[in-house]
Structure formats: C-alpha cells, structure tokens
Image: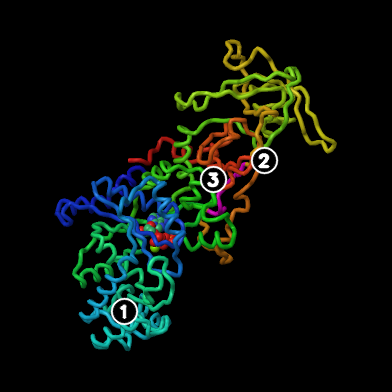
Amino acid sequence: MANMETVQSNFIKQIINEHNASGRYGGRVHTRFPPEPNGYLHIGHAKSICLNFGIAEEYGGKCNLRFDDTNPVKENVEYVDSIKEDIRWLGFDWEDREFYASDYFETLYEYAVKLIRDGKAYVCELTGEEIRAYRGTLTETGRNSPYRDRSVEENFDLFQRMRAGDYPDGSRTLRAKIDMASPNLNMRDPIMYRILRAHHHRTGDAWCIYPTYDWAHGQSDSIEGITHSICTLEFEDHRPLYDWYVTQLEIHHPRQIEFARLNITCTVMSKRKLLRLVQEGIVDGWDDPRMPTISGLRRRGYTPGSLRDFSDRVGVAKKESTIDMALLEHCIREDLNAHALRVMAVLDPLKVVITNYPASEIEEMEAVNNPEDATAGSRAVPFSRELYIEREDFMEDPPKKFFRLAPGREVRLRYAYIIRCEEVIKDAEGNIVELHCTYDSETRSGLPQANRKVKGTLHWVSAPHAVDAEVRLYEQLFDREHPETTDEEGQDFLANLNPASLQIVQAKVEPSLASAMAGTHFQFERKGYFTVDSRYGKKGAPVFNRTVTLRDTWAKIHKGQKTTP
Ligand code: ATP
Ligand code: MG
C-alpha cells in the first residue's frame, strides 16, 4: 500500500512539474476549490480542499474559493456560509479570493454571443425530451437538431430575446454547435443556457436564463487565471468540451487534472443522498455526528488536523476505491491520544459501597491528565465511601480469564485503592443493584507499599460527587460496507441503515466535567474518546458525543505498515 500511494500522490505534481519546466504557465500554480452551494461539505470535499490548497501552498501559488452557483433552484446562502465555515475550520485561507460563477454571468453571456457570432452556437427549440432522443447513445450517433442551421443573425436575435424574458421557461436553449456524431456524448451539441425563472441567492431576478455547469465551469476557471483545474474523474469526459470552449473563445487555457473521488465504507457521500437523510429526519441535520459531513465530523469530535492527516494518507489515485472507515478513525485516535484529557466516566453505573471506609471521609486522588503529555499536569479526583463502577466490570459468576471484579476477588480502583467484593445486593427480581466491598488502606496509589499485584484496574466515580451526563454512543450510520449498492431486492440505500447507529445512555462522570466546554476532547478511560456536543452540550446536564472507541482495528490490521510516504 505504501508504495502505491507514494506514486499516486505524485501524478498531479508530476504534471505541474512538467509545466513548470516547460514554462507553460510561467511557473505559476493557481488552483481553486469550486463547490456548488447545494449542500454541506463532506469528507470527500475535505480531500479536495486539502489537495487544492495544499498544492498551491507547496508551490508557493494561490488557491481560490469559487462557488459554482449556476443552479439557483438548489442553492442557498445557508450552504454558502456553512462551506466557508468548514474550509476555515479545516485551516485553509482563500484570502480575498472568494468568487462566484454568478459574478461572471455577464462575461459568460458575452462569450456566448461570440460563439453565436462565430457560428458555433445556436438557439434550439427542441424540448428536453427531444434533445435527449436526438442525442443518441454510446453505440448510436446523434441526429442534428432541426434548428441547428439558423443564421447567425437569427440566433443572436433569439438569444437576446431569451435573456429579455420573451419566452417561457424551458421553451428554448442555447447549444454549442460541435458534433452530433462525436463518440463523446458531451460533445453532441451540449446545452449552454436554459430559460429558468428562479430567484438566485446573489443575482436575484436579474436573469431568467442560466448557464449550465458545463458552460460556466471551464470559463470561470479561465477568467480566474487558474492553471490547474483539479477535479474528480467523472469530469474526464467533459475535458474535451471544456478545452473546446476555451479554444474557440481564445482565452486562457487551464489544464484539467482528474483524480478518483474519495469513498468510505459504511457511509454515503453524495449530497443528494445526504440531503434525503436530512429531509426525511433520519438524522439530526447536516451536522448530525453520524454524517460524513465536515460539520458532522466536527460535532462528533474530529479535529481539523485529523482530517488533513487522513487526506494525506489516502493520497490521490486515478482509480476509484473505497477507503476503510477504520483509517479515518485511526487518524483521529492518533491525534486525540496525544491531546485529549483523560478522565473517568461511568457509562452504565453500578453502585459500590466500601463498607470499611469512613462515611464522612473524602480523599483527593491525584489523576494524570495525559500520560502522553507531561505538560498536561494532573488534577484531584474525589474518592468516598460510595462509588460507581461500570456494570460490565462485575460478574457474579466469572470465567477464569475475567480479571475484573467478582465475589471474593480484588481489583485496583484507578488512582485509589485495591478493593475486594464481599457481598452482592439484589432487588426482588434478582437484579444486582449494589456491591458491598472492603478496601485495603495500605494500597493507596503512589504509596511504596501500593505495589501489591492485582490483575485488573477499574475506572470509577465518587457517587456524591458524580455529575449526571447524557452520553451519545455512535456507530456507523449504515451496516453495509457499500450501502449505495442496491441489494438483491433492489432496495435503495435507506434499507441499509444501521438501527443501532445512536444509543443514548445516562452516565455518571467525574466532577471536573461539569463545566466542560464544547469542542474539548476527552478520553473517558477504558471507554473511548468523547467531546461535548456543540448543540445540546450546555443544556443542564452535559451531553457528550462519542468520537470513537479505543479499539483501533486499522492499526491492528495494518501493524507495521506505514501509509504515509
Ligand atoms: P456530490 O456528488 O457529493 O454532490 P459534487 O461533486 O457534486 O459532490 P461539488 O460541490 O461540485 O460537489 O464539489 C466541489 C469539489 O469537490 C469538486 O471539485 C469535486 O470534484 C470535489 N469532490 C466532491 N466529492 C468528492 C469526493 N468524494 N472526493 C473527492 N473530491 C470530491
Ligand atoms: Mg459537482
């Protein structure tokens, strides 16, 4: 894997290096990230952002942010704002280069007029359905539109009247006059403009004709002086069209370079599908912590550094593949292991009473904030006669290899004492409600005689000091590795939802967490990494999101392999 990725991470740079050597762009490197503001950004976009801004940075060039806002029906300002917030959060800066394809509507119109004047575009009156039928297929050439051979003057007049609002929506289009027999369907007289009376979030009602994405995109790149238009593979077949446009117009000619989209197991990545999850209320908005959106990952507890690291590690490829979600989780674990504060939280509390511990006594135990980071210091955690431990850390009738608590057995309480379970208290139905234990006062952590060996160490919280917290445990949103592929019964992707993707538990957490701020990262000892939820985190009892568990499946599988070149 390592080798392959070293090579892959270079194919874009190889092209740039060749250009720099030949002087094609005078050594300039200018990229752009061109989102369509029709949804929130996802981790695939993060990959593209890291790539575009990263390459610009590496070559001492620039990267623009350009909103490709050519479809007013699906776009809005909420999306524009969220996109800007996400890119900044990832750590990238477009400085004063925030552009919109809609800023170029007038220029694009003039370009279209030039093509008409040159006999290379015409106004077509076929309906959408007819255009499709005339286009032909991969095996069948297309047929010329009956409107293809209008005079330049007639085309110019009709196009002006399209803009002036003389015709109803959808009744006419402007099409490039290229080649209906081209083996490339994109070259069969593609549509440049459609009539559409829709309010645009920036241009308002100034236009009733809108450029298609294919007509706007390449010219927008050209107008901005972009040198390398990095995009995903599905645009490879559009490249001849984009090249044709800039060649006919005799304007600056960017080089388009395609790379494979990022896909990740157990999730979906298309904005259309993500929008459905939001609209149908399956998730709690675009920033639901189970969403692969940047805002969802942020709310889940992912850090900008972990996403940039992930993006580096997956590299760029020419062939579609699906990256294991475990790699993304591995990246956040590495980051949080180094930075998160370790605290104690009991997610499924079982009461423990230490019968030989004085009722009025409270001791302050010194707990290390992060063993990986000496500068993180330590804190005092209160210890008292009544505690909570994790229910799963006790078994009444344990197998031999169970090294946690059981009747008559001893464990160490982290940062505190060794205790022994003396009695199991049950309710009328036989459920265990409480354990009575004794402690050995000679075994307090840190004391020389504390070295008496026991096999298990448990986390705990002092009952009178514990803070109630809601903890949200997330699993994959889909329980299939490839949820987008329809199954045997032809069910769509929603049939593959994981019913257990969110589990909410009422936990007891150590008192230092009462005032935890949104955006702070914690390792709940033995339980995983957690963060305070940014939406519900401040309501009364704190609300925590589980970012990831501690079990690093990726590190296990890929032990000894390095992905980074
Ligand atoms: P989606 O198909 O998810 O709706 P999109 O391509 O329509 O995504 P855009 O807003 O057009 O969304 O994408 C902006 C940029 O991000 C484009 O340059 C696109 O190539 C890139 N991009 C989108 N999805 C991915 C992905 N999964 N991996 C890498 N880059 C992506
Ligand atoms: Mg797109």
Viewer-side residue, 358 vs 563: 358
Question: Which amino acid type is marked by label 3?
Answer: Ser
Mark earlier in primary sequence (2, 1): 1
Is 387 located above or below residue 445 in the figure? Answer: below
Q: CA distance from mark 3 to mark 2?
A: 18 Å
Image spot of residue 222 (x, y percent): 25, 63
Position of 379 with respect to 132 (left or right) is: right
Task: Judge: label 2 CB < 8 Å from ligand 1.
Answer: no
In the image, residue 473 lies in the stretch drawn in magenta = yes
Image spot of residue 375 (x, y percent): 44, 25
Res 534 label: 3
Image spot of residue 513 (x, y percent): 59, 33
Mark earlier in primary sequence (3, 1): 1
Viewer-side residue, 204 vs 84: 204
Is 204 located above or below residue 366 in the figure? Answer: below
Which residue position is annotated with label 1? 175
Q: Which span is picked out in magenta?
A: 471-480
Image spot of residue 9 (x, y percent): 31, 48
Question: Which amino acid type is marked by label 2?
Answer: Gln
Q: CA distance from mark 2 to mark 1?
A: 61 Å
Q: CA distance from mark 3 to mark 1?
A: 48 Å
Q: Is residue 261 visible?
A: no
Residue drawn at x 27%, y 60% as measured from the top left? 256
In the image, residue 479 lies in the stretch drawn in magenta = yes
Disc 2 is placed on an element classified as strand
Disc 1 is placed on an element classified as strand
Residue drawn at x 37%, y 73% as measured from the top left? 206
List the single residue furthest toward the left: 22
